[in-house]
Amino acid sequence: MTSYSIRKAIEDDAAAILACLQAAFEPFRTQYTLTGYADTVLSPETIRRRMQTMVILVAECSGAVAGTIGCAAVGNGEGHLRGMAVLPDQQGSGLAEALLHAAEGELRGLGCTRVTLDTTEPLRRAIRFYERNGYRSTGRVEDFFGMALYEYAKEL
C-alpha cells in the first residue's frame, strides 16, 4: 500500500500540480478540444489564479506531489470541486478517494451541505469513481469549449 499525506497546496507546489494535471489528462488529450484541454491542465498563470480562488489540496508520496484537487464554497451552502488529478502510477491506490474525502471535509468546514463537480464524456473511469462515492448526475449539461460538461452532485 502506498503511503501518502494530504495537505493544502502552497505557491511552490504550482509546477508539480501542473505536472500532475498534465500526466493524468494526457491519455485524453485527443478526446478534448484544444481549449478544453488547456483549461483542464492549466498554465502557470491559471494555476496561480486558481490557487487564489480555491482551496487546492495535494497528496504527497515520498515527498512528491502525486495528486491534487481544488474546492471552493460557491454560496447557498454549496461547494464545488475542480481539477482532480492523480498520477497514472498512483491511480487505483486509494489516493483519489482520500483526496476526494479531504476536499469534502474542507467544504463541510466552510459550511457546505452539498457539493457539485463537472466532468466530460471521455472520463468514464472518473465518472464511475464519483458515482461509487455518492455523486449523482443532476441532468445539467453545459458547453465546455465545444464539449459536453456533465454536472454531478452529492449531499454532504
Image (spheres, helix red, strand yellow):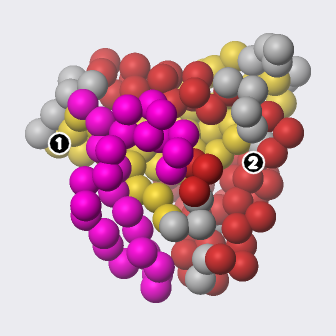
Which segment did they paint magenta? Answer: 127-155
Query: Which amino acid, by three-letter code, is at mark 2?
Result: Cys
The quadrant the C terminus occupies is top left
Residue tagged by mark 2?
20
- Between the C-alphas of marks 2 and 1, the distance is 29 Å
Whether residues under marks 2 and 1 lie with C-beta atoms below 8 angstroms apart, the answer is no
Return the x and y of residue 109 as percentages of the image width and height.
31, 18
* Residue 98 is covered by the magenta coloring: no
| Residue positioned 16% across, 34% down in the render | 77
Picture residue at 32% right of the left edge, 52% below the top: 137
Q: In this view of the protein, which residue sits in the foreground, 88 or 73?
A: 88
Location of mark 1 (residue):
75
Q: Which residue sits at x=36%, y=78%?
A: 143
Of labels 2 and 1, earlier in sequence is: 2
The N terminus lies in quadrant = top right
Residue type at tag 1: Gly
Magenta segment, prevailing SS (helix, strand or loop): strand
Position above or below: 141 against 52: below
Residue 36 appears left or right of 85: left
Q: Say which element carries label 1.
A: strand
Crowding at mark 1 (Cα within 10 Å: few <14, some 14-19, many 20+): few
Q: Position of residue 32 (x, y in %)?
A: 61, 77
